[in-house]
Amino acid sequence: MMNLSYSSLTHLLSRYGSIVMLTVLVVLMSFTSKEFLTVHNLTNVVRQVSVFAIIGTGMTFVIITAGIDLSVGSLLALTSCVAMTVIDSAAGMDYVGILVGLVIGALAGAANGVVIARFKVPPFIATLAGLTVFRGASLVVTNGLPIIKLEGSFRFIGSGMIWGIPVPVIIMIIVVVVMQIVLSRTAFGAYVYAVGGNEEAARLSGIKVGWVKFWSYVLCGFLAGLSGMILMARLSSAQPAVGEGFELDAIAAVVLGGTSLMGGRGAVWSTLIGALVIGILNNGMNLMGVHTHYQLVAKGFLIVLAVLLDDYLKKRR
Amino acid sequence: MSNSTSKRCNSLDPSSEGTLVHPGKGLQESNSRSQLELNHISKAFPGVQALNDVSFDVRGGEVHALIGENGAGKSTLLKILSGAHQADSGTIVINGRETFIEDPRAARQKGIAIIYQELTLVPWLSAAHNLYLGRESQFGRGILPLKQMNAMAREELEKIGIHLDPAVPVAELGVAEQQMVEIARALCENAQFLLMDEPTASLTDREIEILFEKILALKKAGVAVVYISHRLEEIHRIADRVTVLRDGAVVHTGAVSEVTMSELISKMVGRPMSNHFPPRTPAKGTEILRVEPPAGASRSRPVIVHKGEVVGLAGLVGSGRTEWAWRVIGAAPSKGERVFVDGQPVHITTPSKARELGIGMVPENRKDHGLVLMRTVRENVSMTILDRLVNWCGFINMTGQNQSCNYYVNRLGIRCSSDLVECTTLSGGNQQKVVLAKWLVRDCPVIILDEPTRGIDVGTKFDMYTLINELSQGGKGIVLISSDLPELISMSDRIYVMHNGDFVAELDSRKTSQEEVMHFAFGYFNRT
């Protein structure tokens, strides 16, 4: 992804923490569990990770602008509920439904963006409100009941395969690659860094700071919608309660990747690594038969540990 | 790629009007053209006439130094040129045309670039990205041709003699290199007038040499440079003309070669000693605080404070007085100073330890460092004594809190409807008294006051002086950091002068003069 030798080297070094963590985890898991290194299991892990990696990609943009989006989990539920309602309404509406879901995601992100960029409400509060509103809206849409639909072509984007690769994984790879290029190779990407790194300097350089923030939230909302579609297709159902706490996993993936919550630095590919760390950890603990309750505790420790490791490596460099 | 050469930075296009021209290209033309004039500029802030009928000009191919004491009006002048402030009266003329600078963007468009002490780069973007920030459209839409961008940035940087990899994030560059990137950006944006505010403040000697070379090259290329600095020897080296500001007015403009450094210093000082200061009767007792310099700093003197004494610390802004005070109370990492309280060696690593040993500090920036603005006067005052006010299970003794706070509110004459109002509602002077009350209520034997009268009205200043006298007569040792020389000389018994982080002189305030203090502050030790 990086075409310049210097920048790729320094980027790798400064992100060393997450890569070290990932390597250690993979090695550890391969020794402790025979099942871990099987194609079946790894495919499974990456498919699970894809949802978080896609949300995390949008979150990365928002966090680099020194913002945060707490509403993605609820938005994922809302988009899938609306999309499923459309799909369920008549035959042959599968792709219309998905399109509607994506549009709802982008619009909801735009609503966050307007509140934050235009009315200057702190992102934490604006998207906390979004979290409640979108969750409530998905309950309204579905009347609180899950919509289950076991047949339909929409299921392809969740459970389908192309050349033996799960479709969600393909979507994830496309999203990560495209968004990494947008971030590191386009003017918009430079503006995202500029707004988070030194807002005043950005403003003085003639950058429309509000627009940059607005589009970052639109992107984040759209990608939350995309994950909603994938999850809906994989589960063959839309549930108003789905995605609770996903925002925290997405933020964790971003932070594990070494992106600074203070804004101004970070990358999309490192978020993917962060998501993989979380995914493999979850999977490994499942394989080892660790109780879910302990898994949560372990995950929390891991996040702190990874950030400390990253800090340590950065200081040494 | 093929049409890229013509896009570049506009400044490279010799045909464009009134642009900066780089070394070797159309020197004469630009020399005759660019000229920035300020005519009879005045600017007042509530309570202060910051600039009074100031006229100043700079021409292409010239370095014009601007000097003056702290608070002489340099930064106001800079802010007017940058569009951050507008003048109350007077005109700005650029290249013969009268103009109005409404905001920072307008200043940039008119070719005025300012290199501030604090850099305005985006840390984790590459030098090339920073160079072209906000002007990426010249590379077309969509994906940026990074290779081309880096190559152009490299060329641009090499034009001013900087060799660095433009793909490196600027956060990983040295301060000097970052400054060069800023300069390159300014030039690339067509700057004809380069205003530099204390550009060498955070540079090493070697980096300063590089910067000077660049400034001379820019001068040759026809750029007009305004150079603000406290370091007079630098001005002698690179400036052609120098303007001295004092109390918001121009007291001297002329060729640098025609004045000596001593003359410049004399012109800068000499603010009238008109402020009335309450009379002081020194009551020097035993030594309570001694701070010896770190082992390596041979030039520096120990600072000694006796009971009942007011010790003044003089120095220019940035000389390191505030940092020294922070180190003494353990708020910043020590540089190896040895501290003695009542003659006993102590090791202060945190402000809490300093408080225990009886050293309090009223910081320079009361809003950020002195007060919790959204809490009440009472809470703020009692913040330093909560440990004494609580009983064994942690409850605050409200009566005690109320009494001790009220006592100091009355004694210092803090004007507030009650001590239960938020500190935000108080005037600056009263806020300052609250910060002072915090340390009086603790009854600290040593109090460090960092610019205690900055930004407060004359009446409150007088109150503050009276109070300082009362405190010292009551046996406290006061360390007074102030940039107001008449104040410092009138209020202190002895004065230490700091230059570049070292206390280079110890003066008896009854025998010294503003001029003598400034000579030491500027680093001229052997005055003739």
Image (cartoon, rainbow, N blue to C red):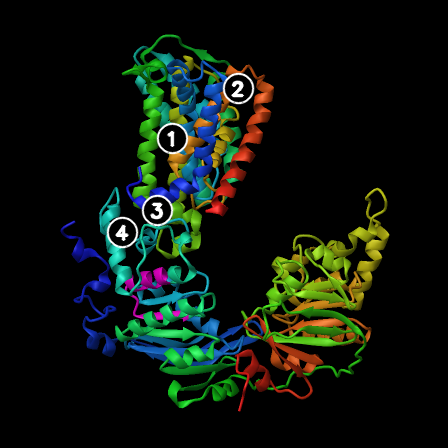
Q: Say if labels 2 and 1 share a chain.
A: yes
The structure residue drawn at horizontal position 81% and vertical position 73%, both measured from the top left corner, is B475
Separation of marks 3 and 2 at Cα, in angstroms? 39 Å
Check the residue under mark 3 and report the chain it is in: A
User: Closer to the camera: disc 1 or disc 4?
Assistant: 4
Label 1 crowd bin: few (<14), some (14–19), many (20+), radius 10 Å:
many
Residue bearing mark 4: B150
Q: CA distance from mark 1 to mark 3?
A: 21 Å
Give percent across and percent down for residue B419: 76, 58
Q: Quarter-wise, where is residue A41 in the image?
A: top left
Indicate the chain on which mark 2 is placed.
A
Which element is circle 4 on? helix
Q: CA distance from mark 4 to mark 2?
A: 46 Å
Q: Which residue is mark 1?
A: A222
Q: Residue at x 48, y 34 (%)?
A: A256
Q: Nearer the viewer, residue A33 or B133?
A: A33
* Residue depth check, mark 4 versus mark 3: number of the one nearer the observer: 4
Nearest the eye: A209 or A157:
A157
Q: Which residues are magenta?
A: B180-196
Q: Nearer the viewer, mark 2 or mark 1?
A: 2
Q: Which residue is mark 2?
A: A285
